[in-house]
Image (tube, rainbow, N blue to C red):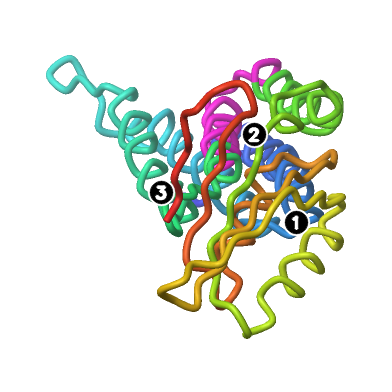
Amino acid sequence: MTWWTSSSSTELQLLFLAFVLCALIGLERQFRQKAAGFRTHVLVGTGSAAFTLVSAFGFSTVLSDEVVLDPSRIAAQIVSGIGFLGAGVIFTRRDVVRGLTTAATIWVAAAVGMAAGAGMVSLAIGLTAAHMFALLALGPIVARMPNRDSNRIVRVTYNDGEGVLRRLLATATQQGYSTFILSTRRFDDSDLVQLDARFKGKPPLQDLVSTIHEIDGVRGVHVRSDDDDDEDSQN
């Protein structure tokens, strides 16, 4: 058995390409301090590339007229496995879903690794470039676009006398929101207070709503628009 074959140089070059491209994707996630950062994306990408290379070159010695292999089977299994890994970074807290973008980048890293492992260098580079352009260039532009968040009213129900309102206002300020309190009402038969407020800022309102849910003493959050009576209840 020889450890160096005629295809070894090509295999290492493609593996290194997958490493570099997935490192770029991982650095972006690491910079944003996401749950899955540099190491996760590098390992996913290079692992996917290695599986693809094994599928392409690993069984050449057993091929014959009687033996036919389907390289796409390993690729299909990679996609299935990455699905479980991506689901691990998605979590729901009180009906608020977080981690979808990070899970999507894991899928992209796997696709980049598979493309590099299959020798589709232009596709791997193009996919990485498109990913970086979407998150780094288009992301800030989309965040500045007008949206319905400015017309939404957030109704927070919380326990009175526990400093919840003070923590809520401090949290909103830290995340870049200006708070406009519209009304407050206390329930006669309990210690609960209902607050209606409008939060204005560049980040998506959903990010703030998710954080409000985690404040001790908050019993429920409802989001609605000025121009309708429908409420998005998040208890």
The residues colored magenta run 105-123
Q: Is residue 227 magenta?
A: no
Identified by mark 3, the residue type is Ala
Q: Is residue 18 above or below residue 67?
A: below
Labels 1 and 3 touching (C-beta < 8 A) = no
Pick the front one: 182 or 173: 182
How many marks the image carries: the answer is: 3
Identified by mark 1, the residue type is Gln
Q: On the rendered structure, is 148 left or right of 48?
A: right
Which mark is on residue 14? 2
Q: Earlier in the sequence, mark 2 or mark 1?
A: 2
Q: Earlier in the sequence, mark 3 or mark 2?
A: 2
**Can residue 137 be seen at all in this image of the molecule?**
no
Point out the image quarter for the C terminus: bottom left
Q: CA distance from mark 2 to mark 1?
A: 24 Å
Q: Secondary structure at mark 1?
A: helix
